[in-house]
Structures are given as structure tokens and as C-alpha cells.
Image (cartoon, rainbow, N blue to C red):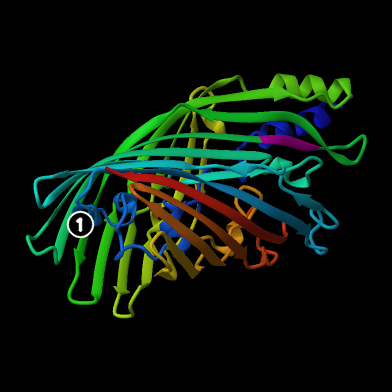
Amino acid sequence: MRSFSRLLTVAIATSFLVSGAAFAAGFGLYEQGAKATGMAGAFGATADDPTAIFFNVAGIAQQRQMAFNTGATAITFANEFRGDPNDVFASGQYGEYVHHTFVPAHFYGIVPIGQQMTFGLGVFTPFGLRTNWADPWAGRFISRDANLKALDVEPAFAWQTADGRFAVGVGADYRRSHITLNRNNGIYNPFSQRIADVANVFLDSDWNSAWGYNVGFLFKPGNWRLGASYRSDMTIDYTGKAQFTQISTGNAQIDAIVKAGLPPNQGITTSIHYPAIYILGVANTSIPTWTIEGDFTRTTWSNFDTLNINFDQTPAVDLVRPQGWHDSNSYRIGANKTASEHWDVRFGALYDETPQPTENVGPLLPDADRSGLTFGVGYHNGGWIIDPTVFVLHFNERSTGGVSSDNFNGTYKTDALLFSVNVGYKF
């Protein structure tokens, strides 16, 4: 009995290692303006409304009226998991997200200064993650609910030449972010011969912050528009707390050993290395009433190569976990047609590569290459502007291929539907 108790104690202590936990990967949000989203995000060269602060800050220099633009995007996900029949643990298992709507909002305002300079202020959400699995969920020992929030505030200046053919802009980017992660711990119960839930682990960070910057260039030779933008990487060092809550198994002997081995609630620290974003756009206006643009975007997800989580009181359960992300590209094409005095029509298509290697696909983030189609309209009358857009996004089916680093193999299917609305006014 003593040997059994020792063995069980070791198993329980080992289970509190934060295996499978990863706070961040492939979670960029590019829907920062309804007009741009209607063009599938191909906006780095057009950049002709206040949302240019995000897409290409140089674009605000060409806007010579004080204006604001505010809005939000409602994002709904449909996700399902089917276990690999060859996986001992996941075989026959099914899971899906709790139905919820993620609504990142944004605000932009610009004020011209003299004839060639413009000041702008943007507030937006460039990154975010929510993966919340509905009970019963076999992957709860890896992740039940993960939630990352980020909010950027960016003051910016842009300047253009007297003829308006060339512009340059720069912004200082202040980011605040918050993370929570919720999962269960389990052990093999020799009495029931099943995996038993013995504790819940809740990691909750403070709101922490860091600074970055972005720069943009815009060149307009004839009917062509060439735009380039760079948004810097940044690292946020998070502090927070870990809360361990015991879950009764109904067996007094196991519960007593779990209680004795349960780590105390304590402080934690970790860091997330947010990627840089490069945008290159080319637009053409030679067809009357049409603007057609193609963009190439590269995101340096390889900055997020390792996750370290440090526990203040129990360093034995500190985690050092390689992530293996790689830089990824997206390809976007969009068009805007002036249909009448008050109406525009927009549409676009995109293909976006995932940065996530197969072995790290899991319940926290089952990412995949994705493709999307967009359609939007714009109404403008007097100073008022209203831009609604619908965006259908399909993720390629993604299998772990039997190489899951979480030892939880299966296939994930994801689709998303996004509705964006912006309201603006030019004074």
C-alpha cells in the first residue's frame, strides 16, 4: 500500500506540470475596418479612410478633412474535433466550441495640420484568441477555455509632398494585454480504471503592456498606388496568478493524496513575443469608378519560438515548451466600385497560411490554412459614411497526423462568419 501511495503521489505531482499549455499562436486579427475588410484586407495602397492608421499609416496624409471612423466586427466560429481512431485516448471522442461571438472594436480619428501633415489616433485590437470547449470535453486536460485580449492605442503622424504623390507616416504603438487559461488535471484511477479529474488549474494574468511602432510609405504615380507598411514586433512580460482547485474523485484515499500534493495558489510570470507585420500593396485606378488592389502580408510568427511559464513558489512545475512557429504569408485581392453618388460596392478574396506546425495543433488553438470571400457596401451622404461587410472564412481540415505533442490526436474543422460595420463622419 505504501508503494502504491508513493506511486500515486508522483503521478499526481507530475500531472500539475502545465503540459499542453500555450497562451499564444496564430491569433492575429486583421479586420480593423469594414471598408478594408470588404476588400479582403487589400488596403495597404488604397488607405483612404482613417483606418489607414492600422493598414498603412502614411495614408492619413492624403486625407485633408478632420474625420473619425468607429466600428466593430462580430466573429462567430463553428469548430469541431473528431478523435483519431488509432489514438488510445482520443479515439471515439467528439468536441465543439461553446457558441459565442467575439466582438473586437476599433476607433480612429484624424486631424489635418496645415497643407501636408495629418495627426491620427487609433484604438484597435490586433490580436485575440478565444477557444472555449463545451462539456463534456475529452481535451479538458489540455485546455478548456483560453482567452487572450489585446488593445492597442496608437498616436500617429503622416506627411505628404505638396503634389500628394508621396507620403510617409509613423506611429507609436502602446499595447495592453490580458490572458486567462483554464484546464483540468487528471490521473489514472486504478480503482475505476479510468482517468479521473482531480483539480482545476486557472491561470489569470494582470493587464500588462509594452511599446512598439509602425511606419508606412505611399507612392501614387499616375493611376498606380504603391503602399508599404511595417508594424513592429514587441514582447509583453506578464505577471499573474495560478489558482489550483481540487476536484473530488469520490475516493477518500486518492483525494487525501491529491490534497497533500496540490500546489498552493501563487504568482506566475511569462512572456509573449508578438510578431511583426509587413504589408505590401499595389492598387490601380485606371478603370473608371474602380479601385483594384492586391496585397502581400508577412507575419513573423517565428518570434514566438518558446513558451516559459514560471511559478513563484513551486519552480519544480515551471514549464519550458518549444513552439516551433514559422513566419507566414497571406495573399489578398479586393476591389471597390463607385456604383452611384452615394453608394460603393466592394468584394475580395484571400488565402492565409497558418504558422502552426502539425505537432502543435491542439485544443488551445487548432489553426489551419484558410481562405475567405468578402462582400461589402459603402453609403456616403454629406459627411456621414456607413460601411457594412460580410466575410466568410473557411479553414482547411487539419489533422494532427498522429504526431500531437499533447498526445491528443484527431482532426479539427473550423469555419467562421464575420460581420463588420463602421460609421464615420468627415467634418
Of residues 29 and 132, the one drawn nearer to the viewer in this rendering:
29
Specify the quadrant that holds the C terminus: top left
The percent position of residue 221, horizontal first and vertical second, equals 17, 75
Please indicate whether residue 139 sits to the left or right of residue 175 in the image. right
Please indicate whether residue 142 sits to the left or right of residue 227 in the image. right
The percent position of residue 178, horizontal first and vertical second, equals 47, 33
Q: Quadrant of residue 85?
A: bottom right
Asked if residue 316 is positioned above or below residue 330 in the image, the reply reads above
- Residue 262 visible at all: no
Specify the quadrant that holds the N terminus: top right
Q: Quadrant of residue 49?
A: bottom left
Of residues 291 and 177, the one drawn nearer to the viewer in this rendering:
291
Please indicate whether residue 181 sits to the left or right of residue 35 in the image. right
Q: Secondary structure at mark 1?
A: helix
Furthest residue to the right? 192
The percent position of residue 324, horizontal first and vertical second, equals 48, 58
What span is in magenta? 183-187
- Magenta stretch mostly in which secondary structure? strand
Asked if residue 379 is positioned above or below residue 284 in the image, the reply reads above
Please indicate whether residue 195 sits to the left or right of residue 141 in the image. right
Q: Amino acid at mark 1?
A: Gln
Of residues 101 and 397, the one drawn nearer to the viewer in this rendering:
101
Asked if residue 53 is positioned above or below residue 85 in the image, the reply reads above
The percent position of residue 295, horizontal first and vertical second, equals 37, 69
Residue found at x 71% / y 44%: 99
Furthest residue to the left? 162
Magenta residue check for 178: no
Circle 1 residue: 62
- Residue 67 visible at all: yes
Dot 1 surroundings within 10 Å: few (below 14), some, or many (20 or more)?
Answer: many
Residue found at x 69% / y 36%: 15
Residue found at x 37% / y 69%: 296
